[in-house]
Image (cartoon, rainbow, N blue to C red):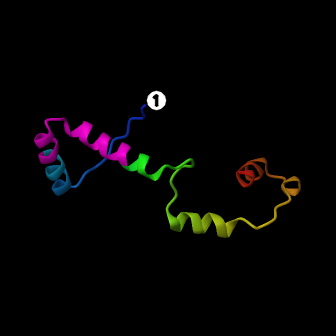
């Protein structure tokens, strides 16, 4: 599977806690974080990308129940609403 690189900021207390856990397990901090993220993602068993409940409410409220996609002149908007 393709890996995506992402630079993240971690608060100092979190960094030290995770570093200690990685050291205890005798693995790198990077690998520990990867394992944690992979385990969390697998537990969700999602077929669609994650959207927080607040974002889902916004998306749902912006989209009318019935849409006549043929009447929409903007191709980008028509594409987005078709999803």
Residue visible at 57% across and 64% down? 56
Q: To which residue does mark 1 refer?
A: 2
Residue 10 relative to residue 74: left or right:
left
Element class at badge 1: loop
- Above/below status of 51 relative to 31: below
Expressed as whole percent of the image width and height from the top left, the position of residue 51 reads: 52, 57
- Picture layout, residue 58 above or below residue 3: below
Residue 53 relative to residue 5: left or right: right
Q: Which residues are magenta?
A: 20-39
Determine which quarter of the picture holds residue 22: top left
Q: Nearer the viewer, residue 39 or 78?
A: 39
Residue with the most extreme right position: 71
In this view, the residue in front, 44 or 66, is 44
- 54 magenta-colored: no
Residue at 84% over, 55% down = 69
Q: Position of residue 80 (x, y in %)?
A: 70, 51
User: Horizontally, is 1 left or right of 48 in the view?
Assistant: left
User: Magenta stretch: dominant SS?
Assistant: helix
* Front-most of residues 34 and 70: 34
User: Is residue 29 found inside the magenta-colored segment of the image?
Assistant: yes
Number of numbered markers? 1
Q: Is residue 7 above or below residue 13?
A: above
- Residue name at image x 68 percent, y 67 percent: 62
Residue 7 percent coordinates (x, y): 33, 41
- x and y percentages locating residue 16 in the rendered image: 14, 51
In the rendered image, the residue lying farthest to the top is 1
Callout 1 environment at 10 Å: few (<14), some (14 to 19), or many (20+)?
few
């Amino acid at each position: 599977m393709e890996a995506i690189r992402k630079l993240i900021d971690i608060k100092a207390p979190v960094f030290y806690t995770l570093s200690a856990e990685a050291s205890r397990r005798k693995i790198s901090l990077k690998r520990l974080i990867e394992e944690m993220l992979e385990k969390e993602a697998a537990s969700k068993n999602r077929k669609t990308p994650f959207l927080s409940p607040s974002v889902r409410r916004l998306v749902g409220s912006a989209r009318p129940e019935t849409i006549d996609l043929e009447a929409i002149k903007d191709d980008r908007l028509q594409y987005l609403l078709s999803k």
